[in-house]
Amino acid sequence: MYPVLSSSRFAPSQKKGVICTAAVALAILSAGPALAQVPQSVHQSCMICHGQTGENTIYPMVPRLSGQQVQYLAWQLKQFKAHTRADQNAQIYMWPVAQAMSQKEIQSVAKYYAAQSPMHSASSPRPGVSAGKQIFLQGVAAQGIPACMACHAVNATGRGIFPRLAGQRYAYIIQQLTYLHDGNRVNPIMQPVAEKLTNRQMREVAAYLSGLHRHQ
């Protein structure tokens, strides 16, 4: 039970403040159960950059996490914690965050963001979408580049440790492919592929993937 405030006890100039305060209190109480389901690590650190639902749209180099594969998210957090994923942004932003997380918290955060509903990417089509689609679905035999869909699934929704790429940020995809191409991000599966991609092909793949509908 919560005390009932009578507006008759306040002067007219105070009544608006009482009403607003009561409205805010009711909003907080009604949101309580939903907020209680958000892992503490998300509240304390993750949501600063990624947002509470993993769809923060402020920073172009921050990846979308909603609907991402649980295994992939947990794997990456463990790599950040162990300092085995050591690209520049990982060291600056993710190492301190992951270092403070327990294995239980890592699983909790991974499951939470994976359960969030992916949003549709409303960005305008970028140049190179058709070429990027061909690379993703068919690869480039002449360069020894396999079809990306072989691991990431035909709709780029990912599976297991292979991440969802549909609707991922354009700039982030290019950044990570560049890290892999240059050896700044270690991944025995992706490095041999990224090393063969030209800068133009990276942009084309990113153009295709970033424009895919997130609900696929």
Image (spheres, rainbow, N blue to C red):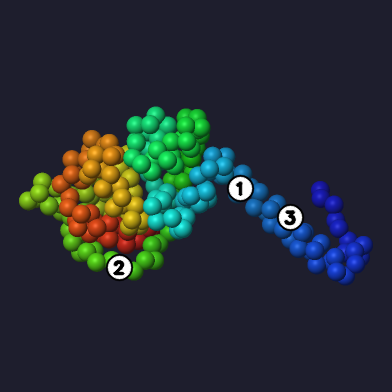
Label 1 amino acid? Leu
The answer, for residue 164, to whether it is visible in the render is yes
Q: In this view, does 185 lie to the left or right of 37?
A: left
State the mark number for residue 125.
2
Q: Residue furthest right?
A: 9
Q: In this view, does 190 lie to the left or right of 66?
A: left
Query: Which residue is pictured at 28% across the width and 39% down the height?
Result: 184
Q: Is mark 2 on a helix, strand or loop?
A: loop
Q: What element carries label 3?
A: helix
Q: Is residue 62 left or right of residue 141?
A: right
Label 2 amino acid? Pro
Q: How crowded is mark 1: few (under 14 residues within 10 Å), some or many (20 or more)?
A: some
Q: Residue 91: image x %, image y %? A: 40, 38
Label 3 amino acid? Ala
State the mark number for residue 52.
none
Q: In which quarter of the image is residue 214?
A: bottom left
> What's the CA distance linking mark 2 and mark 3?
43 Å
Q: In which quarter of the image is residue 213?
A: bottom left
Query: Which residue is pictured at 42% across the width and 32% down the height?
Result: 81
Q: Residue 2: image x %, image y %? A: 81, 50
In this view, the mark in front (2 or 3)? 2
Q: Residue 59: image x %, image y %? A: 43, 55
Q: Residues within 10 Å of mark 3 (few under 14, many from 20)?
A: few
Q: What element carries label 1?
A: helix
Q: How crowded is mark 2: few (under 14 residues within 10 Å), some or many (20 or more)?
A: few
Of residues 170 and 69, which is closer to you in this image?
Answer: 170
Q: Residue 140: image x %, image y %? A: 12, 52
Q: Earlier in the sequence, mark 1 or mark 2?
A: 1
Mark 3 lies on residue: 25
Residue 138 versus residue 211 in the image, above or below: above
State the mark number for residue 35.
1
> What's the CA distance linking mark 3 and mark 1?
14 Å
